[in-house]
Image (tube, rainbow, N blue to C red):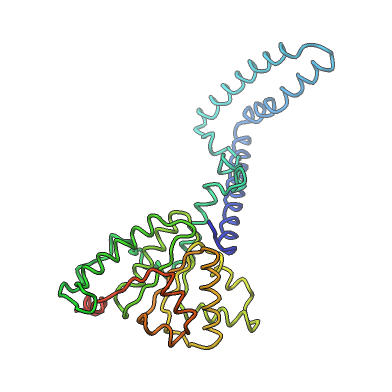
Amino acid sequence: MSYTRAVLSRARQRLEEDNRKKEAEAAENLAKAYARLPRLRAIDRELRTTSAAVVAACFDQGRDPAQAVQQIRARNKELQAERQWILDDAEISEESLDNSPLCNLCGGSGYKDGSMCECLQELCRQEQRHALSPLLATGRERFENFSLDVYPERYYPSIGTTPRKLMQRNLSYCRKYAAQFQPGAGNLLFSGATGLGKTFLSACIARQVTDRGYGVVYASAAKLFADYEGVKFDRLDASAVEGYSVCDLLILDDLGTEMTTPLAVSSLYQLVNNRMLDRKATLISTNLRPEDLEPRYGGQIASRLLGTYELIVFEGEDVRRLRNK
């Protein structure tokens, strides 16, 4: 699960803040309880100090501490019963006084046995969704909300079927891709005119892959190339493009709408090639037809996109215009 440093840093910060907040609230609640219930303070003090003092005394005197331990256990049981009675009578919950970390599995560190704990994973997922907010803007970006009704049922000779049947296949393929996604999953190339659902299906994949705990980064082609240009000319720190390389799934939207400069072509080649070598999944959507890729980006890039990416063709009429009608 490869999250960007920015996402992981924000998640860790939230975990630390949540633990500090819980500890501070527990301390405040305990102070109020002690002020209101002096006997509670006395019981807690005795529970903290009695055991160690008695056992130490037994060792100092050369006596077997077993009997003392039994006495301690009996006394502690009495004290804990009295303590619980006091809390119940005062209608104070034990949880409100508990200053232990939020997560018992990792002790609040976010890691257990060298792996990321579920508590930190969930915060990473939340931060990941926030980072993807430009793509997941409406909250409707789910496969079940993808409507096939807007795609024509008439036969298109250019695709050998109807747009509706084509999109039904595309929807099934994308749903399966997201459900089975794992590091090293295949690459996708969405090709079709504006308004045919490329970005929506990309968002559906991004949401499900994120919910399954994988690192996803989304960028328009214009922003991605602007970031690489900013780093090259020292206008931006290298961290601005770090996520494009390390994430489990990169979604590059609207390829072909950017200013195609030599730097943009070079950046695209390095990105596509390196992610392919690192077995990192990439989803690229473009309004360009497959045959338009080589004239615009050159043979090396076209060869990789058409040779190692699963081509998903979008056909039909502009969905936005049809809905407006």
Q: Of 15 and 311, which appears nearest the observer?
A: 311
Does residue 285 appear to the left or right of 300 in the view shown?
left
Q: Of 296 and 201, which appears nearest the observer?
A: 296
Q: Which image quadrant for residue 288?
A: bottom left
Q: Is residue 30 above or below residue 229?
A: above
Q: Which image quadrant for residue 14?
A: bottom right
Q: Is residue 59 above or below residue 23?
A: above
Q: Of 163 and 86, which appears nearest the observer?
A: 163
Does residue 190 appear to the left or right of 49 in the view shown?
left
Residue at 19%, 77% (x, y): give it: 156
Q: Position of residue 244 (x, y in %)?
A: 54, 70
Residue 24 seen in the figure: no
Q: Position of residue 272 (x, y in %)?
A: 51, 73
Q: Which image quadrant for residue 208?
A: bottom left
Q: Position of residue 57 (x, y in %)?
A: 80, 18
Instruction: Locate the C terminus by quadrant.
Output: bottom left
Does residue 1 appear to the left or right of 142 in the view shown?
right
Does residue 44 appear to the left or right of 122 in the view shown?
right
Residue 81 seen in the figure: yes
Looking at the image, which residue sits at the far left?
154
Count of all numbered marks drawn on residues in the image:
0
Residue at 60%, 19% (x, y): give it: 77
Q: Position of residue 299 (x, y in %)?
A: 47, 82
Residue at 49%, 58% (x, y): give it: 183
Residue at 83%, 13% (x, y): give it: 62
